């Protein structure tokens, strides 16, 4: 091929090769970074892994194997919180249950691999739902809704468990502090949710919030760059993002029937989280610890939002011990569950995640 046409072809081909090379380089860096983060997570949890293996002989392995289908169903329930809502939106592309489960396992993997308080998971969910026609604001609404829903259910379960323990007179006098703590946590959750809905429900309030966020981000950028860069993201983009959240909240309030299935799946998912610990307890011959696990898991989740590694299990085990559960049993249950779920998370989510990043899956 010669002449102008051939020259255009060569230029186009050269451009595409360079573009592909840049994309491949970025993906390679991202994959390497993820692998490093996963290695760090495994390193941080290695002592617990060794301890969990040492305690395997004390468990019923056949009961522990129930965690495989239980974990898959929990991921499915998590995905249904998002997708049972999206199915009501005509502007969103359809998706299969297989796609939903795969995205859910990937999201769980990212949330464990990236120690960023859920921000990494939100970014990844936005990226994965983009091809289905879901905007960043809509994805954020779903992400916040999922966390809000599961948190409310977790604390509600804890209150029910505490009430039953009180009726049965199974809460030691020195552990009475757990009651006001649980009540304060529930009140705090409802106050935060009310504030979020209050701000997001009004166009004027959401625009004021957008301007405030844009101003704070601009100030932070100027400080970090010593005044060389005034802003990282234009106000219009920030306004559009929060505007999408506002529209999503508005649609949800006007069509409350859209939320029935997501709420139901939220209840199922939250119980599955507790059931994971309960299956380990049953494998140790202690099925009666369900109520203690409910309370410990809810209060321990507060610590999980502060420090991603270790403090969650410490808080949960501490609450269970305060309620009268033997120290060795409480620690074995929390440590073993943490290790098993971590291994399962990496095994089930890492391969589909790597395929997506490499561009081999949509």
Image (cartoon, grey):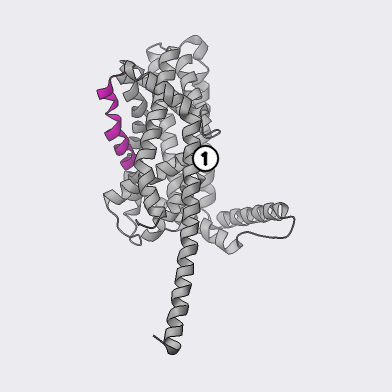
Res. 242 in view = yes
Residue 16 position within the rendered picture, expressed as x and y whole percent measured from the top left? 45, 71
Q: Is residue 17 left or right of residue 210?
A: left
Residue 235 position within the rendered picture, expressed as x and y whole percent measured from the top left? 60, 61
Chain part drawn in magenta: 59-78
Q: Which one is in front, 352 or 237? A: 352
Res. 335 in view = no
Residue situated furthest right in the rendering: 226
Residue 331 position within the rendered picture, expressed as x and y whole percent measured from the top left? 44, 19
Residue situated furthest left in the rendering: 62
Q: Is residue 154 magenta?
A: no
Residue 61 position within the rendered picture, expressed as x and y whole percent measured from the top left? 28, 22
Residue situated furthest front in the rendering: 2
Q: Secondary structure at mark 1?
A: loop
Instruction: Tell me the residue at 48%/67% (across/down).
Output: 19
Residue 329, quarter of picture = top left
Q: Which one is in front, 353 or 212? A: 353
Determine whether 19 is above or below 43 in the image.
below
Q: Quadrant of the N terminus?
A: bottom left
Instruction: Tell me the residue at 30%/20% (across/down).
Output: 283
Which residue is denoted by mark 1 in the rendering? 115
Q: Quadrant of the C terminus?
A: bottom left
Give the overall secondary structure of the magenta segment: helix
Residue 60, quarter of picture = top left
Determine whether 124 is above or below 178 in the image.
below
Residue situated furthest bottom in the rendering: 3
Instruction: Tell me the residue at 47%/64% (across/down).
Output: 21
Q: Is residue 65 magenta?
A: yes
């Amino acid at each position: 091929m010669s002449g102008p046409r051939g020259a255009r072809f060569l230029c186009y081909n050269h451009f595409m090769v360079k573009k592909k090379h840049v994309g491949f380089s970025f993906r390679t860096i991202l994959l390497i970074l993820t692998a490093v983060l996963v290695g760090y997570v495994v390193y941080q949890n290695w002592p617990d892994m060794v301890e969990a293996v040492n305690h395997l002989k004390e468990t019923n392995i056949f009961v522990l194997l129930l965690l495989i289908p239980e974990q898959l169903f929990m991921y499915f329930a998590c995905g249904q919180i998002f997708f049972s809502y999206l199915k009501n939106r005509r502007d969103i592309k359809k998706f299969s249950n297989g796609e939903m489960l795969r995205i859910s396992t990937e999201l769980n993997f990212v949330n464990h691999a990236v120690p960023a308080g859920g921000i990494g998971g939100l970014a990844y969910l936005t990226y994965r739902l983009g091809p289905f026609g879901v905007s960043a604001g809509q994805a954020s609404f779903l992400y916040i809704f999922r966390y809000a829903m599961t948190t409310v259910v977790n604390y509600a379960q804890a209150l029910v468990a505490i009430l039953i323990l009180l009726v049965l007179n199974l809460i030691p006098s020195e552990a009475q502090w757990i009651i006001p703590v649980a009540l304060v946590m529930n009140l705090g959750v409802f106050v935060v949710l009310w504030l979020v809905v209050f701000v997001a429900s009004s166009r004027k309030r959401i625009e004021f919030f957008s301007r405030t966020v844009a101003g704070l981000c601009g100030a932070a950028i100027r400080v970090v760059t010593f005044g060389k860069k005034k802003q990282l993201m234009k106000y219009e983009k920030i306004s559009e993002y929060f505007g999408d959240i506002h529209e999503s909240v508005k649609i949800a309030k006007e069509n409350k029937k859209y939320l029935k299935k997501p709420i139901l799946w939220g209840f199922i998912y939250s119980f599955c989280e507790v059931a994971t610990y309960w299956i380990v307890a049953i494998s140790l011959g202690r099925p009666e610890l369900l109520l203690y696990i409910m309370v410990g898991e809810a209060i321990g989740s507060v610590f999980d939002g502060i420090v991603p590694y270790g403090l969650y299990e410490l808080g949960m085990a501490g609450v269970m011990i305060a309620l009268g559960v033997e120290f060795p049993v409480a620690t074995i249950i929390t440590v073993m569950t943490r290790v098993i779920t971590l291994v399962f998370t990496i095994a089930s989510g890492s391969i589909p995640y790597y395929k997506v990043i490499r561009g081999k899956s949509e």
